[in-house]
Amino acid sequence: MSQQRPKPSVAVTGASTGIGYAIARAFAGAGYPIAVVDLDGATAQDVATTLTDEFGVAAMGIFADVADSDSSRRAHEKIEATLGSPGVLINNAGIMQQKKGWIEELPEENFDRMLDVHVRGALVWSKLVLPAMRADGFGRIINMSSVNAVLAVPHRLAYVTAKKAILGFTEGLALDCARAGITVNAILPGYILTDTLAQRAQQGLLNKDDYNERTPVGRWGEPEEIARVAVFLADPASSFITGAKFVIDGGLTIRGDAGEDIEASPYA
Ligand SMILES: NC(=O)c1ccc[n+]([C@@H]2O[C@H](COP(=O)([O-])OP(=O)(O)OC[C@H]3O[C@@H](n4cnc5c(N)ncnc54)[C@H](O)[C@@H]3O)[C@@H](O)[C@H]2O)c1
Protein backbone atom coordinates (compact mmCIF):
# COMPACT_ATOMS: atom_id res chain seq x y z
CA MET A 1 0.00 0.00 0.00
CA SER A 2 1.32 3.44 -0.80
CA GLN A 3 1.21 6.07 1.94
CA GLN A 4 0.58 9.77 1.43
CA ARG A 5 3.89 11.55 1.94
CA PRO A 6 5.47 14.68 0.47
CA LYS A 7 7.20 14.00 -2.83
CA PRO A 8 10.94 13.43 -2.27
CA SER A 9 13.45 15.38 -4.29
CA VAL A 10 14.81 13.73 -7.41
CA ALA A 11 18.41 13.96 -8.62
CA VAL A 12 18.92 13.19 -12.29
CA THR A 13 22.53 12.98 -13.47
CA GLY A 14 23.30 13.98 -17.05
CA ALA A 15 20.04 15.91 -17.17
CA SER A 16 21.08 18.97 -19.21
CA THR A 17 20.04 17.20 -22.38
CA GLY A 18 18.74 13.99 -23.94
CA ILE A 19 17.10 11.23 -21.94
CA GLY A 20 18.13 12.79 -18.60
CA TYR A 21 16.45 16.06 -19.55
CA ALA A 22 13.24 14.22 -20.48
CA ILE A 23 13.35 12.38 -17.14
CA ALA A 24 13.84 15.60 -15.16
CA ARG A 25 10.96 17.14 -17.07
CA ALA A 26 8.65 14.19 -16.47
CA PHE A 27 9.33 14.25 -12.71
CA ALA A 28 8.81 18.03 -12.63
CA GLY A 29 5.51 17.51 -14.45
CA ALA A 30 4.55 15.02 -11.73
CA GLY A 31 5.31 17.62 -9.04
CA TYR A 32 8.68 16.40 -7.72
CA PRO A 33 11.42 18.86 -6.65
CA ILE A 34 14.30 18.37 -9.10
CA ALA A 35 18.09 18.55 -9.03
CA VAL A 36 19.51 18.69 -12.55
CA VAL A 37 23.10 17.42 -12.23
CA ASP A 38 25.48 17.69 -15.18
CA LEU A 39 29.02 18.27 -16.36
CA ASP A 40 27.49 21.23 -18.20
CA GLY A 41 26.48 23.20 -15.10
CA ALA A 42 25.34 26.32 -16.99
CA THR A 43 22.82 24.39 -19.09
CA ALA A 44 21.73 22.47 -15.99
CA GLN A 45 20.84 25.80 -14.35
CA ASP A 46 18.90 26.93 -17.42
CA VAL A 47 16.99 23.63 -17.43
CA ALA A 48 16.13 24.05 -13.75
CA THR A 49 14.82 27.57 -14.36
CA THR A 50 12.68 26.31 -17.24
CA LEU A 51 11.24 23.50 -15.12
CA THR A 52 10.35 25.88 -12.30
CA ASP A 53 8.74 28.34 -14.74
CA GLU A 54 6.81 25.63 -16.54
CA PHE A 55 5.72 23.38 -13.69
CA GLY A 56 6.06 25.55 -10.56
CA VAL A 57 8.32 23.00 -8.81
CA ALA A 58 11.48 23.71 -6.85
CA ALA A 59 14.41 22.94 -9.14
CA MET A 60 18.14 23.54 -9.10
CA GLY A 61 20.84 22.98 -11.70
CA ILE A 62 24.25 22.02 -10.54
CA PHE A 63 27.68 21.08 -11.91
CA ALA A 64 29.21 17.70 -11.09
CA ASP A 65 31.41 15.17 -12.80
CA VAL A 66 29.69 12.02 -11.56
CA ALA A 67 32.94 10.08 -11.79
CA ASP A 68 34.63 12.52 -9.42
CA SER A 69 33.86 12.01 -5.73
CA ASP A 70 34.74 15.54 -4.62
CA SER A 71 32.67 17.50 -7.14
CA SER A 72 29.80 15.06 -6.61
CA ARG A 73 29.98 15.44 -2.82
CA ARG A 74 29.90 19.23 -3.15
CA ALA A 75 26.90 19.02 -5.49
CA HIS A 76 25.09 16.67 -3.12
CA GLU A 77 25.72 19.01 -0.17
CA LYS A 78 24.09 21.87 -2.08
CA ILE A 79 21.12 19.72 -3.07
CA GLU A 80 20.69 18.53 0.52
CA ALA A 81 20.74 22.12 1.80
CA THR A 82 18.21 23.32 -0.80
CA LEU A 83 15.86 20.44 -1.63
CA GLY A 84 16.77 17.78 0.93
CA SER A 85 18.85 14.72 0.10
CA PRO A 86 17.29 13.02 -2.94
CA GLY A 87 14.83 10.23 -2.24
CA VAL A 88 15.00 9.33 -5.92
CA LEU A 89 18.28 9.06 -7.81
CA ILE A 90 18.53 8.52 -11.54
CA ASN A 91 22.06 7.51 -12.54
CA ASN A 92 21.74 8.54 -16.17
CA ALA A 93 24.95 10.45 -17.07
CA GLY A 94 26.70 8.73 -19.92
CA ILE A 95 29.13 9.10 -22.79
CA MET A 96 29.41 7.40 -26.12
CA GLN A 97 32.48 5.41 -27.07
CA GLN A 98 35.05 7.94 -28.30
CA LYS A 99 37.06 5.56 -30.42
CA LYS A 100 35.33 2.62 -32.02
CA GLY A 101 37.27 -0.40 -33.13
CA TRP A 102 39.00 -3.57 -32.11
CA ILE A 103 40.46 -4.07 -28.64
CA GLU A 104 43.96 -3.55 -30.04
CA GLU A 105 42.95 0.03 -30.95
CA LEU A 106 41.16 0.85 -27.69
CA PRO A 107 43.22 3.13 -25.43
CA GLU A 108 43.06 1.98 -21.80
CA GLU A 109 42.29 5.57 -20.74
CA ASN A 110 39.11 5.54 -22.87
CA PHE A 111 38.08 2.23 -21.32
CA ASP A 112 38.72 3.63 -17.82
CA ARG A 113 36.76 6.81 -18.49
CA MET A 114 33.81 4.81 -19.83
CA LEU A 115 33.67 2.71 -16.67
CA ASP A 116 34.32 5.73 -14.46
CA VAL A 117 31.39 7.74 -15.83
CA HIS A 118 28.87 4.91 -16.07
CA VAL A 119 29.78 2.60 -13.19
CA ARG A 120 31.88 4.59 -10.73
CA GLY A 121 29.45 7.49 -11.21
CA ALA A 122 26.54 5.27 -10.18
CA LEU A 123 28.51 4.10 -7.13
CA VAL A 124 29.55 7.62 -6.08
CA TRP A 125 26.01 9.00 -6.29
CA SER A 126 24.38 5.96 -4.67
CA LYS A 127 26.77 6.30 -1.71
CA LEU A 128 25.85 9.99 -1.37
CA VAL A 129 22.09 9.45 -1.26
CA LEU A 130 21.85 6.15 0.61
CA PRO A 131 22.35 7.35 4.22
CA ALA A 132 19.28 9.64 4.06
CA MET A 133 17.28 6.99 2.17
CA ARG A 134 18.04 4.41 4.85
CA ALA A 135 17.13 6.88 7.62
CA ASP A 136 13.88 7.64 5.81
CA GLY A 137 13.04 4.00 5.04
CA PHE A 138 12.36 4.98 1.44
CA GLY A 139 14.46 5.32 -1.69
CA ARG A 140 14.47 4.70 -5.41
CA ILE A 141 17.64 4.28 -7.47
CA ILE A 142 17.31 3.87 -11.22
CA ASN A 143 20.39 3.11 -13.31
CA MET A 144 20.55 3.77 -17.04
CA SER A 145 21.95 0.74 -18.82
CA SER A 146 21.33 -0.07 -22.50
CA VAL A 147 20.14 -2.87 -24.76
CA ASN A 148 23.87 -3.26 -25.44
CA ALA A 149 24.10 -4.88 -21.99
CA VAL A 150 22.14 -7.87 -23.32
CA LEU A 151 22.83 -7.52 -27.04
CA ALA A 152 26.54 -6.87 -27.46
CA VAL A 153 27.70 -5.13 -30.62
CA PRO A 154 31.15 -5.23 -32.20
CA HIS A 155 33.57 -2.27 -31.99
CA ARG A 156 32.07 -0.90 -28.77
CA LEU A 157 33.80 -3.02 -26.17
CA ALA A 158 34.09 -0.32 -23.50
CA TYR A 159 30.45 0.74 -23.77
CA VAL A 160 29.14 -2.83 -23.77
CA THR A 161 31.29 -3.66 -20.73
CA ALA A 162 30.12 -0.58 -18.82
CA LYS A 163 26.43 -1.12 -19.56
CA LYS A 164 26.62 -4.79 -18.53
CA ALA A 165 28.46 -3.80 -15.33
CA ILE A 166 25.57 -1.51 -14.48
CA LEU A 167 23.30 -4.57 -14.38
CA GLY A 168 25.59 -6.28 -11.87
CA PHE A 169 25.72 -3.09 -9.81
CA THR A 170 21.93 -2.83 -9.92
CA GLU A 171 21.37 -6.40 -8.78
CA GLY A 172 23.99 -6.32 -6.01
CA LEU A 173 22.75 -3.00 -4.64
CA ALA A 174 19.10 -4.09 -4.89
CA LEU A 175 19.85 -6.99 -2.55
CA ASP A 176 21.87 -4.83 -0.15
CA CYS A 177 18.95 -2.40 0.13
CA ALA A 178 16.03 -4.82 -0.11
CA ARG A 179 14.95 -4.61 3.55
CA ALA A 180 15.39 -0.85 3.77
CA GLY A 181 12.47 0.30 1.61
CA ILE A 182 14.91 1.17 -1.17
CA THR A 183 14.48 -0.29 -4.64
CA VAL A 184 17.18 -0.38 -7.31
CA ASN A 185 16.33 -1.03 -10.95
CA ALA A 186 17.86 -0.67 -14.40
CA ILE A 187 16.41 0.71 -17.62
CA LEU A 188 17.76 -0.62 -20.91
CA PRO A 189 16.82 1.75 -23.74
CA GLY A 190 17.00 0.77 -27.39
CA TYR A 191 17.57 3.45 -30.05
CA ILE A 192 16.28 6.71 -28.57
CA LEU A 193 16.24 9.80 -30.75
CA THR A 194 17.75 12.53 -28.58
CA ASP A 195 18.58 15.98 -29.97
CA THR A 196 22.24 14.96 -30.16
CA LEU A 197 21.48 11.89 -32.27
CA ALA A 198 18.98 13.80 -34.43
CA GLN A 199 21.75 16.32 -35.15
CA ARG A 200 24.17 13.53 -36.03
CA ALA A 201 21.58 12.18 -38.45
CA GLN A 202 21.18 15.62 -40.00
CA GLN A 203 24.95 15.87 -40.42
CA GLY A 204 24.92 12.52 -42.20
CA LEU A 205 26.86 10.80 -39.39
CA LEU A 206 24.18 8.18 -38.85
CA ASN A 207 21.40 6.85 -40.99
CA LYS A 208 18.09 7.34 -39.17
CA ASP A 209 16.16 5.04 -41.52
CA ASP A 210 18.58 2.22 -40.90
CA TYR A 211 17.64 2.22 -37.21
CA ASN A 212 13.92 2.48 -38.03
CA GLU A 213 14.33 -0.66 -40.08
CA ARG A 214 16.31 -2.52 -37.41
CA THR A 215 13.70 -1.86 -34.72
CA PRO A 216 10.67 -4.19 -34.98
CA VAL A 217 8.13 -1.41 -34.29
CA GLY A 218 9.71 0.48 -37.19
CA ARG A 219 10.85 3.67 -35.47
CA TRP A 220 13.19 5.23 -32.92
CA GLY A 221 12.00 5.68 -29.34
CA GLU A 222 11.40 9.12 -27.84
CA PRO A 223 13.22 10.22 -24.65
CA GLU A 224 9.80 10.70 -23.02
CA GLU A 225 9.11 6.98 -23.50
CA ILE A 226 12.03 6.23 -21.16
CA ALA A 227 11.10 9.00 -18.72
CA ARG A 228 7.62 7.64 -18.02
CA VAL A 229 9.10 4.32 -16.89
CA ALA A 230 11.41 6.13 -14.46
CA VAL A 231 8.45 8.01 -12.94
CA PHE A 232 6.53 4.74 -12.60
CA LEU A 233 9.46 3.06 -10.83
CA ALA A 234 9.87 5.97 -8.42
CA ASP A 235 6.30 5.73 -7.17
CA PRO A 236 5.91 4.47 -3.59
CA ALA A 237 3.49 1.84 -4.95
CA SER A 238 6.33 0.30 -7.02
CA SER A 239 7.96 -1.09 -3.87
CA PHE A 240 7.90 -4.76 -4.97
CA ILE A 241 9.91 -4.02 -8.11
CA THR A 242 13.62 -4.28 -7.38
CA GLY A 243 16.69 -5.64 -9.14
CA ALA A 244 14.67 -5.64 -12.36
CA LYS A 245 15.62 -4.80 -15.92
CA PHE A 246 13.23 -2.68 -17.98
CA VAL A 247 14.01 -3.15 -21.66
CA ILE A 248 12.38 -0.30 -23.62
CA ASP A 249 13.45 -0.99 -27.17
CA GLY A 250 10.52 -1.40 -29.58
CA GLY A 251 11.20 -5.14 -29.74
CA LEU A 252 14.86 -4.90 -30.76
CA THR A 253 16.22 -7.52 -28.35
CA ILE A 254 13.51 -10.13 -28.89
CA ARG A 255 13.97 -10.46 -32.62
CA GLY A 256 15.92 -13.53 -33.65
CA ASP A 257 17.15 -14.44 -37.10
CA ALA A 258 15.05 -17.07 -38.93
CA GLY A 259 17.97 -17.79 -41.22
CA GLU A 260 15.82 -17.32 -44.32
CA ASP A 261 14.40 -14.37 -46.23
CA ILE A 262 10.93 -13.46 -45.05
CA GLU A 263 8.88 -11.05 -47.13
CA ALA A 264 7.38 -7.98 -45.48
CA SER A 265 3.91 -8.66 -44.06
CA PRO A 266 1.10 -7.74 -46.48
CA TYR A 267 -1.04 -6.94 -43.41
CA ALA A 268 1.12 -4.13 -41.99
N1 LIG B 1 20.14 7.68 -26.73
C1 LIG B 1 20.14 6.37 -26.82
O1 LIG B 1 19.77 5.79 -27.87
C2 LIG B 1 20.57 5.53 -25.64
C3 LIG B 1 20.39 4.14 -25.73
C4 LIG B 1 20.75 3.34 -24.65
C5 LIG B 1 21.27 3.91 -23.50
N2 LIG B 1 21.45 5.27 -23.43
C6 LIG B 1 22.01 5.80 -22.18
O2 LIG B 1 21.15 6.81 -21.67
C7 LIG B 1 21.92 7.79 -20.97
C8 LIG B 1 21.64 9.16 -21.57
O3 LIG B 1 21.98 9.12 -22.96
P1 LIG B 1 21.64 10.30 -23.96
O4 LIG B 1 21.52 9.69 -25.30
O5 LIG B 1 20.54 11.14 -23.40
O6 LIG B 1 23.04 11.10 -23.91
P2 LIG B 1 23.37 12.64 -24.17
O7 LIG B 1 24.79 12.65 -24.66
O8 LIG B 1 22.32 13.29 -25.00
O9 LIG B 1 23.33 13.27 -22.70
C9 LIG B 1 24.22 12.85 -21.72
C10 LIG B 1 24.34 13.93 -20.65
O10 LIG B 1 25.25 13.43 -19.64
C11 LIG B 1 26.16 14.46 -19.30
N3 LIG B 1 27.41 13.87 -18.81
C12 LIG B 1 28.33 13.17 -19.51
N4 LIG B 1 29.34 12.81 -18.71
C13 LIG B 1 29.05 13.29 -17.47
C14 LIG B 1 29.73 13.25 -16.23
N5 LIG B 1 30.92 12.66 -16.11
N6 LIG B 1 29.15 13.85 -15.16
C15 LIG B 1 27.95 14.47 -15.28
N7 LIG B 1 27.27 14.55 -16.44
C16 LIG B 1 27.82 13.97 -17.52
C17 LIG B 1 26.36 15.25 -20.59
O11 LIG B 1 26.86 16.55 -20.33
C18 LIG B 1 24.95 15.24 -21.16
O12 LIG B 1 24.18 16.33 -20.67
C19 LIG B 1 23.37 7.36 -21.12
O13 LIG B 1 23.76 6.63 -19.97
C20 LIG B 1 23.36 6.46 -22.34
O14 LIG B 1 24.41 5.51 -22.35
C21 LIG B 1 21.12 6.08 -24.48
Image (cartoon, grey):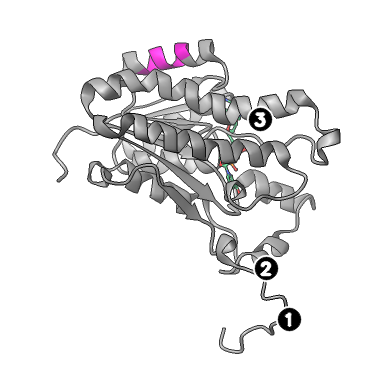
Picture quadrant where residue 255 is located: bottom right
Residue at 67% x, 65% y is 214
Residue at 67% x, 68% y is 213
The response on whether ligand 1 sits within 8 Å of label 3 is: no
Label drawn at residue 261: 1
**Ligand 1 lies in which image quarter?**
top right
Residue 162 spot, x, y in % from top left:
61, 35
137 within the magenta span: no
Residue 94 spot, x, y in % from top left:
59, 34
Picture quadrant where residue 55 is located: top left
Residue 154 spot, x, y in % from top left:
75, 49
Q: Earlier in the sequence, mark 1 or mark 3?
A: 3
Residue at 52% x, 48% y is 188
Along the line of sight, the residue nearer the viewer: 183 or 39: 183
Badge 2 is on which residue? 213
Spatial separation of the CA atoms under disc 1 and disc 2: 15 Å
Q: Earlier in the sequence, mark 2 or mark 3?
A: 3
Residue at 25% x, 29% y is 180
- Magenta stretch bounds: 73-79
Spatial separation of the CA atoms under disc 1 and disc 3: 38 Å
Spatial separation of the CA atoms under disc 2 and disc 3: 29 Å
Q: Looking at numbered disc 2 in the image, what kind of residue is underneath it?
A: Glu
Q: Is residue 55 visible?
A: yes
Horizontal placement of 250 versus 57: left or right?
right
Q: Looking at numbered disc 1 in the image, what kind of residue is underneath it?
A: Asp
Which secondary structure lies at badge 3?
helix
Q: Earlier in the sequence, mark 1 or mark 2?
A: 2
Label drawn at residue 114: 3
